Image (spheres, rainbow, N blue to C red):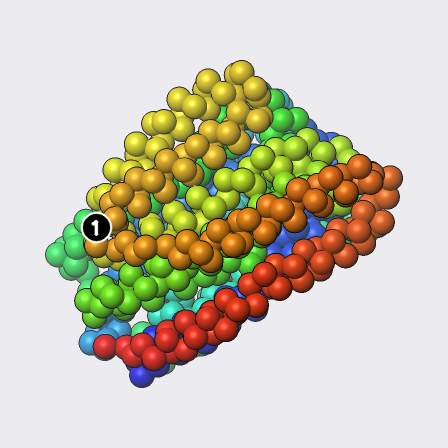
């Protein structure tokens, strides 16, 4: 099931290719859909639609009590020993639990939509969207199991191929709604459900053809209490750790809709889309870190873990300087080009958030290390503490400075989590940073930023989205050229680092 003979470097580069290739195809589809929808509905309607999606996504992450995550832990060992009956058994346990919880959540949202809309979203117009998304729980659990299976066997191609199929149908449905002139948040909600169902069908097809028929069809399910207990016991630990992170990521989104109103939610959801732009480039790296750190830890190769931590930290900080300063100048222009003039406030929030992005980049690296060196409890404690602080900050700041307060609370917990995770790894996994390299980038990029800010800010207008887009593209290319000139020597060093990674062999 897994390519047992591939080196660590081969896995890192080959599977990373599929993660990047499909990310660069899929991610723009999400933006195109949101851009199209934002131009057709009001700010408040957009807030309602995406805050229902946020709530549904949050609950779907809880719907299996994280048994799906157990698959990524147990399946590689069973595959190594060719214990296919245990693989089928664990999959069956996860499927039964998820179907039960999915049906329960579907029933609650379908029949409780009116109550939730009035008492939580404080608008009756959310009820219809909630009822449509109740259908989400009927099928999402099946996909979650299969997607976790694909990650467990490190098949990034199938994992991303299924996601691409879903987005193609969602985008097609969105275009069809616009074509027949039936733009309404209810209809756009149905486009998500259509994409989900196609997603599930195609994922089941890939799983059945590639894995179930060749390996699992003739195996019998082992109904073992000890096996079930082992899977669920591990799942409980992972559930507490992982779901704490999910809660933390959703606090600000949910508290805005509860403490404020749908219009503010609309500004914030477009801000979240804008701040995710840098993650389109570096996001797939975070998925790659999981199997890489796992194998290095299994081989007790602490030296290489330290090297990788230093490597990613160094280049993530530089990428932050590159993205952060560009967004600081052009945040509002980007918001105007992508989401129309009515969402300029989203650009204002992005402008200041860009200065804190680096802490999100770095905490992703640290959390991956904590996970795979067995410090799950440490990660859990850090995240739970951050949840408590973030809730308090949101309550205070949202009431004082509205939607800006939610963003500020998020920036603070990015910094807080990174500091605590860095302290946890300090003794064993710390390496002195490349101060010369970092200061060179900080100095040059800040000088460029100041000069460009003085020259370009006065000439930025919001008269035409097309002319603004062309302006940003030219400036962006010039910005990249300056960045490459500054770091032309480091490019060779970067290639040397990749060659070092290629020399690491699977133990």
Q: Quadrant of residue 374?
A: bottom left
Q: Quadrant of residue 378?
A: top left
Residue 479 picture location, percent across and down: 67, 56
Q: Residue at x 12, y 56 (%)?
A: 226
Q: In this view, does 227 lie to the left or right of 120?
A: left
Q: Mark 1 points at which residue?
A: 427
Residue 24 picture location, percent across and down: 60, 63
When the figure is inspected, residue 406 is found, relative to residue 69, above or below; the finding is above
Front residue of 354/93: it is: 354
When the figure is inspected, residue 151 is found, relative to residue 55, above or below; the finding is below
User: Does the rendering let one see residue 170?
Assistant: no
Residue positioned most to the top: 400
Front residue of 210/311: it is: 311
Q: Residue at x 35, y 70 (%)?
A: 153
The quarter of the picture where the N terminus appears is bottom left
Q: How many marks can you see?
A: 1
When the figure is inspected, residue 166 is found, relative to residue 261, above or below; the finding is below
Callout 1: SS: helix
Q: Is residue 74 left or right of residue 399?
A: left
Residue positioned most to the left: 226
User: Does the rendering let one see residue 282?
Assistant: yes
The quarter of the picture where the C terminus appears is bottom left
Q: Which residue is drawn at 26% across and 55% down?
A: 429
Dot 1, crowdedness within 10 Å: few (<14), some or many (≥20)?
A: few
Front residue of 452/220: it is: 452
Q: Is residue 51 left or right of residue 5?
A: right
Residue 145 picture location, percent across and down: 38, 58
Front residue of 17/217: it is: 17
Q: In this view, does 246 lie to the left or right of 136?
A: left
Residue 224 picture location, percent across and down: 15, 59
């Amino acid at each position: 099931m897994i390519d047992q003979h591939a080196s660590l470097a081969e896995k890192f580069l080959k599977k990373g290719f599929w993660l990047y290739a499909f990310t660069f195809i899929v991610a723009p589809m999400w933006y195109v859909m949101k851009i199209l929808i934002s131009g057709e509905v009001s700010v408040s309607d957009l807030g309602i639609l995406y805050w229902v999606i946020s709530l549904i996504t949050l609950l779907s992450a809880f719907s299996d009590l994280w048994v799906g995550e157990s698959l990524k832990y147990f399946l590689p060992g069973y595959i190594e020993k060719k214990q296919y009956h245990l693989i089928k058994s664990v999959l069956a346990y996860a499927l039964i639990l998820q179907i039960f919880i999915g049906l329960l959540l579907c029933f609650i949202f379908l029949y409780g939509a009116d109550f939730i809309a009035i008492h939580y979203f404080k608008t009756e117009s959310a009820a219809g969207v909630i009822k449509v998304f109740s259908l989400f729980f009927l099928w999402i659990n099946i996909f979650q199991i299969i997607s976790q299976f694909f990650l467990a066997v490190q098949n990034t191609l199938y994992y991303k191929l299924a996601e691409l199929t879903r987005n193609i149908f969602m985008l097609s449905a969105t275009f069809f709604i616009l074509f027949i002139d039936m733009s309404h948040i209810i209809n756009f909600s149905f486009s998500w459900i259509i994409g989900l169902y196609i997603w599930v069908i195609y994922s089941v097809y890939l799983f059945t053809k590639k894995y179930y028929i060749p390996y699992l069809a003739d195996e019998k399910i082992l109904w073992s209490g000890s096996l079930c207990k082992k899977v669920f016991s591990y799942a409980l630990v992972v559930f507490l750790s992982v779901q704490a992170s999910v809660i933390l990521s959703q606090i600000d989104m949910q508290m805005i809709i509860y403490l404020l109103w749908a219009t503010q939610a609309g500004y914030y959801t477009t801000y979240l889309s804008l701040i995710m732009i840098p993650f389109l480039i570096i996001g797939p790296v975070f998925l790659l870190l999981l199997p890489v750190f796992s194998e290095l830890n299994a081989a007790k190769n602490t030296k290489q873990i330290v090297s990788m931590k230093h490597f990613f930290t160094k280049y993530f900080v530089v990428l932050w300087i590159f993205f952060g300063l560009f967004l600081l100048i052009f945040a509002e222009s980007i918001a105007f080009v992508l989401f129309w003039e009515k969402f300029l406030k989203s650009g204002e929030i992005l402008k200041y958030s860009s200065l804190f992005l680096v802490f999100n980049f770095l905490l992703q690296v640290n959390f991956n290390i904590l996970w795979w060196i067995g410090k799950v409890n440490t990660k859990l404690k850090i995240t739970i503490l951050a949840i408590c602080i973030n809730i308090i900050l949101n309550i205070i700041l949202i009431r004082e400075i509205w939607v800006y307060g939610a963003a500020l609370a998020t920036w603070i917990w990015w910094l807080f989590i990174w500091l605590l995770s860095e302290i946890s790894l300090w003794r064993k996994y710390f390496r002195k940073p490349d101060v010369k390299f970092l200061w060179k980038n900080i100095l040059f990029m800040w000088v460029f930023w100041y000069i460009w800010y003085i020259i370009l800010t006065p000439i930025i207008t919001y008269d035409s989205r097309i002319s603004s887009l062309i302006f940003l593209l030219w400036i962006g290319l010039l910005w990249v050229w300056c960045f490459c000139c500054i770091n032309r020597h480091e490019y060779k060093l970067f290639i040397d680092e990749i060659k070092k990674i290629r020399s690491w062999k699977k133990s």
